[in-house]
Image (cartoon, grey):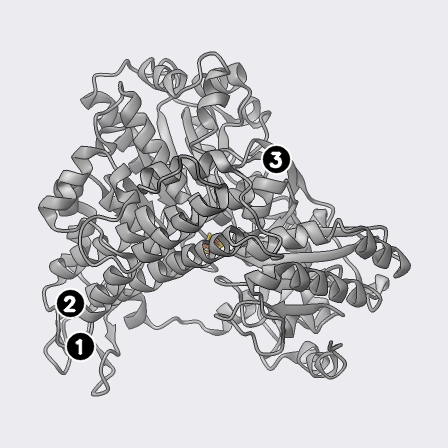
């Protein structure tokens, strides 16, 4: 018999708890089961002291000082930890930046006219970017300007010398620090290759030099690849505006074709949304007995189509398997990043099709329909047809859609926030700055990042966000963290009344915003950097990013991208709480640098912790230190409001884990479903 498991310890989301119980009935093996089966996790790996860079090892350093203290080549624990971290940063930066490169390719396609279906939707943003990138605009067509911009951006990835163009947006003080430290980011590809070279066996042997190089690469991500991705997406698909929608598994529709988009890149998903509104495909769905076509999302593709189209969100990272287990999803289309290879096996528990679409990401067991910008419309229509076909195989008696879904408002950006804060006549960040200066708002904190199986899904996100807003901190969010808050109802303006401290509540009520602002996907963390730039430029609460009463947190970090984001935040002057502790525990030198010394160099630093309350206290203390240094007024309302951190968790249920991980019933069903998968 398997161990008794309390699903409340797996997720604080009641919808997830219900599906986890259904998973047990189905005999499905989820990520939680695989995580349990993996215990105990490798202690050397957890501390970051395992090195497998060359083929003489692998080596591992004994953290208790009794066994080997250096690897076969002589590498110390400090070097091994730094090298592993550096390689994670290179990988994370590569993922974000290749996303940027892909959408630049779509912009190039759009600029050529043709039948791809893409075009420049936001010429205002295009012209602003053209001015920044030195592209002549006077007397030229939108497509000509867009083509030149796309070519300039493509070339920027390989820039060998000089600063990345978007990095010049950073405040002057910060850029001077980067120059002094030798970490001003050059081309994105250049920095990633440089870092991977240094982290190769027998190259950079100084852990601190390696960490500085990792910061340079991370900066090329945040102020380069990610920022370019956000900019170009706003040009192609429109700058978001505040928009209402809903989040959680309850957005799945019993009587409609449910097509889930999952991954990160919006190019195909935007086209899928359009295809789902095509009259002939809607007629096809009706012929199949469906009342419509419902497109919803998982992870950051969800955030992209939420921000611009208001499409509902089915869930965050750990919802990807759960959504399929409801039996209500007809087709899940995936692009890149955060896509579990387990999805086809899980899908085989029901009738669900999984379709991979990226040339970078093939998923064994999924059908692959490759997305190419020049035939995007056709690919999107083909996928919608597949979803309708799959709907005809749905077994309604096996469908279990949890009722839970919450209202939300999303779509905030550095571009539109000034209008929401100041209104048409006083547009700008001044009202926020005045509220901070007067002690109504303690500061602004970005809470971002993934889910991890190391804590109950969403527990840290919700605990941290609730504590912060109760302490009069305005929270901005991206990624799966924003989805956690959305599911818990924290992205509604009413959440200010229910959860915010009195000062923040006053501000939110005055301007009609939620206390938690959803600003987009993982690459849209660049929007948060842009907000920091604007706050510095407006003046009054700090002449540099590191002087602002702001901070960041990744409460359930999981991916290498989270490490890259955390590091570019720190390199940009931001205090950043990072949970759980990444693989740095094996090196005192690395921890002391990243949690201490680096602050003298960049103005930012990490707080690594497993404890969410320690993160809260660290962030509040940091905000208060910055307020004191700026001689801002004391907070008007001390003490905040009491918080029930477990409020999102209602039911307590026992769950018996499946006996093995051989795929159980779903593995066999998968073979059957693949055998009958329709082909064009
Ligand atoms: S999707 S990187 S789990 S936030 Fe951007 Fe979520 Fe983290 Fe993936």
Q: Residue furthest front?
A: 139
Q: In the rendering, at what x and y percent does residue 57 appear? A: 22, 85
The percent position of residue 406, horizontal first and vertical second, equals: 65, 38
- The span from disc 3 to disc 2 (Cα, nearest Å) is 45 Å
Can you give x and y, in whole percent of width and height, for residue 678 in the image? 76, 77
Vertical position of residue 43 compared to residue 439: above or below: below
Please tell me whether residue 455 is drawn above or below residue 433 in the rendered image.
below
Label ID, residue 79: 2
Location of the C terminus (image quadrant): bottom right
Q: Are marks 3 and 1 in contact (CB under 8 Å)?
A: no
Task: Say whether disc 2 or disc 1 marks the residue closer to the N-terminus.
Answer: 2
Quick check: 374 left or right of 401? left
**Which residue is under mark 1?**
201
One can see residue 44 in this view: yes
Give the crowd class for mark 1: few <14, some 14-19, many >=20 residues within 10 Å: some
Reading the chain from its start, which is encountered first: label 3 or label 2? Answer: 2
Q: Position of residue 366 (x, y in %)?
A: 63, 74
Task: Determine the CA span between mark 2 and mark 1.
Answer: 11 Å
Looking at the rendered image, the disc whose residue lies closer to the viewer, 2 or 1, is 1
Quarter of the image with the N terminus is: bottom right
Residue 584 in view (yes/no) = no
Q: Secondary structure at mark 1?
A: loop
The residue pinned by badge 3 equals 408
């Amino acid at each position: 018999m398997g161990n008794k498991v309390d699903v409340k310890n797996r997720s604080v989301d009641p919808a997830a708890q219900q599906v986890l119980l259904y998973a047990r009935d189905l005999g499905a093996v989820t990520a939680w089961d695989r995580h349990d089966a993996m215990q105990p996790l490798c202690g050397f790996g957890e501390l970051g002291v395992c090195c497998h860079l060359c083929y003489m090892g692998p080596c591992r350093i004994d953290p208790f000082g009794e066994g080997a203290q250096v690897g076969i080549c002589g590498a110390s624990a400090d070097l091994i930890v730094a090298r592993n971290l550096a390689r994670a940063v290179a990988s994370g930066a590569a993922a974000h930046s290749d996303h940027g490169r892909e959408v630049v390719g779509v912009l190039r396609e759009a600029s050529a006219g043709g039948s791809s279906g893409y075009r420049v939707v936001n010429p205002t943003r295009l012209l602003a970017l053209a001015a920044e990138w030195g592209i002549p605009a006077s007397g030229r067509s939108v497509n000509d300007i867009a083509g030149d911009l796309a070519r300039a951006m493509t070339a920027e990835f390989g820039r060998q010398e000089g600063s990345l163009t978007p990095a010049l947006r950073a405040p002057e003080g910060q850029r001077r620090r980067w120059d002094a430290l030798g970490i001003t980011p050059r081309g994105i590809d250049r920095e990633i290759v440089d870092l991977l070279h240094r982290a190769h066996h027998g190259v950079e042997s100084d852990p601190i030099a390696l960490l500085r190089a990792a910061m340079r690469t991370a900066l090329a991500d945040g102020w380069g690849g990610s920022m370019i991705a956000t900019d170009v997406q706003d040009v192609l698909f429109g700058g978001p505006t505040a928009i209402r929608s809903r989040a959680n598994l309850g957005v799945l529709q019993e009587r409609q074709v449910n097509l889930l988009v999952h991954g990160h890149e919006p190019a195909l998903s935007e086209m899928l949304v359009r295809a789902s509104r095509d009259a002939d495909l809607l007629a096809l769905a009706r012929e199949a007995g469906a009342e419509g076509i419902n497109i919803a999302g998982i992870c950051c593709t969800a955030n992209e189509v939420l921000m611009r189209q208001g499409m509902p969100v089915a869930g965050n990272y750990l919802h990807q398997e759960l959504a399929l287990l409801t039996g209500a999803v007809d087709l899940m289309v995936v692009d890149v990043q955060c896509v579990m290879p387990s999805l086809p096996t899980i899908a085989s528990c029901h009738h669900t099709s999984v379709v991979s679409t990226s040339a970078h990401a093939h998923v064994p067991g999924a059908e692959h329909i490759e997305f190419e910008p020049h035939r995007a419309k056709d690919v999107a229509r083909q996928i919608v047809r597949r979803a309708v076909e799959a709907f005809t195989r749905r077994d309604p008696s096996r469908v279990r859609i949890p009722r839970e879904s919450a209202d939300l408002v999303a779509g905030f950006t550095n571009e539109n926030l000034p209008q929401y804060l100041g209104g048409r006549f006083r547009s700008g960040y001044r009202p926020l700055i005045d509220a901070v200066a007067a002690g109504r708002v303690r500061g602004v904190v970005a809470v971002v990042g993934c889910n991890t199986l190391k804590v109950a899904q969403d527990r840290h996100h919700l605990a941290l966000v609730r504590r912060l807003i109760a302490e009069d901190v305005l929270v901005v969010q991206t990624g799966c963290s924003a989805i956690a808050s959305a599911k818990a109802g924290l992205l509604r303006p009413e959440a200010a009344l229910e959860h915010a401290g009195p000062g923040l509540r006053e501000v939110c009520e005055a301007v009609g915003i939620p206390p938690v602002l959803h600003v987009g996907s993982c690459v849209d963390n660049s929007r948060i950097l842009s907000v920091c730039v604007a706050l510095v430029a407006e003046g009054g609460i700090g002449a540099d990013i590191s002087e602002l009463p702001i901070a960041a947190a990744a409460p359930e970090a999981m991916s290498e991208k989270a490490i890259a984001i955390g590091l570019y935040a720190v390199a940009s002057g931001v205090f950043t709480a990072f949970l759980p502790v990444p693989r740095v525990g094996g090196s005192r030198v690395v921890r002391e640098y990243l949690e201490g010394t680096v602050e003298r160099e960049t103005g930012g630093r990490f707080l690594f912790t497993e404890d969410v309350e320690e993160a809260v206290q660290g962030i509040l203390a940091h905000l208060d230190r910055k307020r004191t240094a700026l001689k801002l007024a004391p907070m008007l309302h001390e003490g905040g409001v009491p918080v029930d951190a477990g409020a999102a968790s209602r039911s307590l249920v026992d769950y018996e884990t499946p006996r093995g991980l051989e795929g159980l019933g779903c593995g066999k069903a998968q073979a059957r479903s693949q055998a009958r998968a329709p082909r064009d």
